[in-house]
């Protein structure tokens, strides 16, 4: 079992990353994490306590090396293990902003987006780094007409979820009869996997995708409407999945449908197997590495195609969490301590459910360290509480830490996925800043909100301001 205890490597420096297991989704710490000679946590060559002094608290800290490594492992994994062409697209709902989009695009990934806002962010990033021809796939179970128009105008491929959307696309297609709209069809594969109910999407009772019983009718509809250019099929079975079997089962199910579609005359060439690879949040979590997952998916798809005598499609995976989660940590400042004898000790920090809503939403679990006491003995069990007016605003229940004092810097690990992107202004807390670190350099990528930002959308009608 891995531990969060610092390790001493040959050169005497204390490293936290596990040299022998460098798939970012399997490490608790970002890959560049180490303990410096001040006994402080260092990421990307930057002392975390210094970053907090400079950029404030709480602070999201993104390690560029970890993110880039994860991107490369996906891309190289498919190149090594899949006999056909492949494409990796970042499920940007995990964390969508200009800088991260730029890094991911530069690494050669495409994007999976789920709203006009995400499309706008990605397009702006691509424009600023002067990158063209980056594939963008537009997901969603209730895309508005305006969103569809915006996506079509910007050459996104639409991953169609339902009948209403098909009908809306046909109407929109009539305005531009010369250029068919590129689409994939999202199907609900009916595959069960062991993850939280809210992040399970592949079982039949799901709000996402076409019910497979209707597949022939959907194919016929698309064939009858040449304004729709159906390029392929998609399915996504859920998130934070450690098993390989569901993805292998999915390959066979999708290949059956793919064959059916080809036989009906659809010009299918792309097969999108979704994302969902889990990451290690706790020492006891044991996800397959990125390469192991990619290999399992690649071989399963290749085999399913061979067995059915169909040419290898362009294989697409759309990971989110496993690309970005481990790259980021959140640094908080320790504040109040409440000791309830024989019951519990609460340590409060200066953030909570507004910057990390996962514990209160999904009962998610996290590990943390005290960034300025990295080698001190872990001697007390405490519960890390947020500062929100909500009893459930607990970031970590029962964690063993060194004795902390107000002003210490608590660092929660693996907060890159679904933290900032789900952050809110609950209790009118400004959203924290985020920095990206690399080689001893730290750059702001998301400015901290200030009090004025909180009032940006507020309007006071005249009749209420008159006394
Ligand atoms: C959320 C989502 C993903 C990414 O899931 P991860 O578990 O973050 O890898 C991929 N595809 C679809 C359709 C999704 O909804």
Image (cartoon, rainbow, N blue to C red):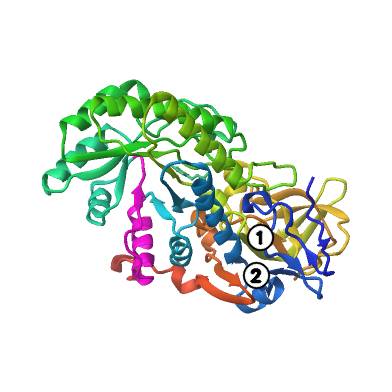
State if disc 2 and disc 1 touch (CB < 8 Å): yes
**Image height check: is 336 above or below 450?**
above
For the point 53% across and 64% down, the residue is 431
For the point 53% across and 27% down, the residue is 192
Span highlighted in magenta in the image? 115-141
Quarter of the picture holding the N terminus: top right
> Within 8 Å of ligand 1, the CB of disc 2?
no
Q: Where is residue 237 in the image (x, y as percent from the top left)?
A: 49, 34
Front residue (pair 56, 191): 191
Is label 1 in a helix, a strand or a loop?
Answer: loop
Query: Alpha-carbon neighbours of circle 1 within 10 Å: few (<14), some, or many (≥20)?
Result: many
Say whether residue 318 is visible.
Answer: yes
Q: Residue 44 carries which label?
A: 2
Q: Which mark is residue 30?
A: 1
**Image height check: is 341 above or below 272?**
below
Is label 2 in a helix, a strand or a loop?
Answer: loop
């Amino acid at each position: 079992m891995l531990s969060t205890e610092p390790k001493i490597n040959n050169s005497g420096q204390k490293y936290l990353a596990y040299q022998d297991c460098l798939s970012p989704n399997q490490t608790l710490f970002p890959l560049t994490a180490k303990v410096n000679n001040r006994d402080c946590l260092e990421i990307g060559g930057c002392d975390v306590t210094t970053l907090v002094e400079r950029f404030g608290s709480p602070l999201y800290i993104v390690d560029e090396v970890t993110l880039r490594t994860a991107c490369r492992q996906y891309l190289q994994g498919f190149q090594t293990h899949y006999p056909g062409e492949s494409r990796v697209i970042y499920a940007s709902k995990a964390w969508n902003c200009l800088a991260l989009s730029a890094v991911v695009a530069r690494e050669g990934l495409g994007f999976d987006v789920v709203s006009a806002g995400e499309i706008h962010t990605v397009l702006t990033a691509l424009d600023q780094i002067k990158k063209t021809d980056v594939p963008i796939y537009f997901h969603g179970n209730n895309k508005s007409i305006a969103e569809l128009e915006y996506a079509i105008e910007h050459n996104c491929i639409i991953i169609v979820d339902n009948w209403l959307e098909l009908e809306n696309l046909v109407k929109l297609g009539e305005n531009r009869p010369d250029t068919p709209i590129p689409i994939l069809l999202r199907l609900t594969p009916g595959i069960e996997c062991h993850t939280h109910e809210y992040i399970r999407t592949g079982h039949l009772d799901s709000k996402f995708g076409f019910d497979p019983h209707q597949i022939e009718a959907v194919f016929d509809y698309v064939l009858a409407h040449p304004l729709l250019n159906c390029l392929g099929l998609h399915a996504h079975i859920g998130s934070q999945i450690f098993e390989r079997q569901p993805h292998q089962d999915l390959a066979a199910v999708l290949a059956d449908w793919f064959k059916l579609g080809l036989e009906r005359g659809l010009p299918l060439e792309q097969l999108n197997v979704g994302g969902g690879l889990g990451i290690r949040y706790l020492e006891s979590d044991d996800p397959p590495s990125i390469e192991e997952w990619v290999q399992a998916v690649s071989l399963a798809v290749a085999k399913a195609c061979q067995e059915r005598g169909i040419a290898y499609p362009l294989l697409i995976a759309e990971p989110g969490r496993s690309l970005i989660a481990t790259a980021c940590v959140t640094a908080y400042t320790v504040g109040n301590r409440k000791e309830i004898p024989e019951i519990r000790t609460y340590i409060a920090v200066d953030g909570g459910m507004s910057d990390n809503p996962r514990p209160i939403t999904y009962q998610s679990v996290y590990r943390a360290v005290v960034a300025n006491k990295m080698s001190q003995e872990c001697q007390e069990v405490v519960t890390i509480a947020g500062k929100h007016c909500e009893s459930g605003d607990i970031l970590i229940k029962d964690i063993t830490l060194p004795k902390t004092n107000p002003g210490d810097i608590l660092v929660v690990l693996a907060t890159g996925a679904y933290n900032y992107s789900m952050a809110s202004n609950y209790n009118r807390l400004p959203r924290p800043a985020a920095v990206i670190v690399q080689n001893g350099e730290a750059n702001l990528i998301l400015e901290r909100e200030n009090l004025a930002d909180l009032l940006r959308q507020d309007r006071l009608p005249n009749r209420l301001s008159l006394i």
